[in-house]
């Protein structure tokens, strides 16, 4: 499973070494409703960006985390050049958080901290899903309504989209 998924992972055009063991990749991500990610009032939201507003789109910076689980493709996601990472709180109702920590500094803080920032990727027919490693069964999602914060859900469908397009830039 791991090797076939790895072959489908978007390639990068501008990797750099992190702690001598991995690359930072830059990709574009948008949901299946064509909503792009951007910052609004210090929250990462998904909306339809057109014309001059298209420059607001946030690129996703990510690193592969191969030490977590060899059977699943795992990554750590960030924005703003890798300076703000997407993390998941724990608890019965986990929350997606945007934290001011550099993606390259996460390896310095140990496994427990890394798990909160790790997502398992799955790909089916060119659509990607991001499952929280710290909260199995919870997926990165957008709302069907535009300009709302991205979050986590256990119940995709009626109000939450969990399928994304993910391509290198």
Image: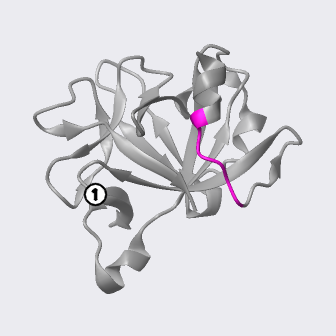
Helix, strand or loop at label 1? It is: loop
Please identify the residue farthest to the front as the structure is shown: 125
User: Considering the image in quadrants, where does the N terminus appear?
Assistant: top right
- Vertical placement of residue 1 versus 39, above or below: above
Residue 23 x %, y %: 76, 46
Residue 135 x %, y %: 42, 20
Q: What range is drawn magenta here?
A: 8-13
User: Considering the image in quadrants, where does the C terminus appear?
Assistant: bottom right
Q: Is residue 68 left or right of residue 145?
A: right
Which image quarter: residue 73?
A: top right
Residue 163 colored magenta?
no
Residue 3 x %, y %: 66, 22
Decide which of 136, 10 is in the foreground and name it.
Answer: 10
**Residue beneath the point at 45% across and 27% down:** 132
Please identify the residue farthest to the bottom as the structure is shown: 52
Q: Where does label 1 land, which residue? A: 34
Give the main secondary structure, helix, strand or loop, of the magenta stretch.
loop
């Amino acid at each position: 499973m791991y090797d076939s998924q790895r072959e489908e992972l978007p390639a990068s055009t501008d990797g750099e070494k992190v702690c001598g063991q991995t690359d930072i990749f830059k990709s574009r991500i948008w949901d299946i409703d064509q909503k792009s990610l951007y910052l609004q009032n210090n929250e990462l939201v998904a909306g339809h960006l057109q014309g001059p507003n298209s420059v607001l789109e946030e690129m996703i910076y990510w690193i592969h985390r191969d030490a977590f689980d060899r059977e699943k493709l795992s990554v750590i996601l960030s924005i703003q050049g890798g300076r703000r990472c997407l993390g998941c709180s724990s608890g019965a109702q986990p929350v997606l958080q945007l934290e001011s920590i550099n993606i390259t500094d996460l390896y310095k803080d140990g496994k427990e901290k890394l798990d909160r920032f790790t997502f398992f990727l799955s790909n089916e027919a060119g659509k990607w899903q991001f499952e929280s490693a710290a909260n199995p069964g919870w997926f990165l999602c957008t709302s069907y309504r535009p300009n709302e914060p991205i979050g986590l859900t256990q119940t995709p469908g009626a109000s939450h989209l969990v399928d994304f397009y993910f391509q290198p830039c």
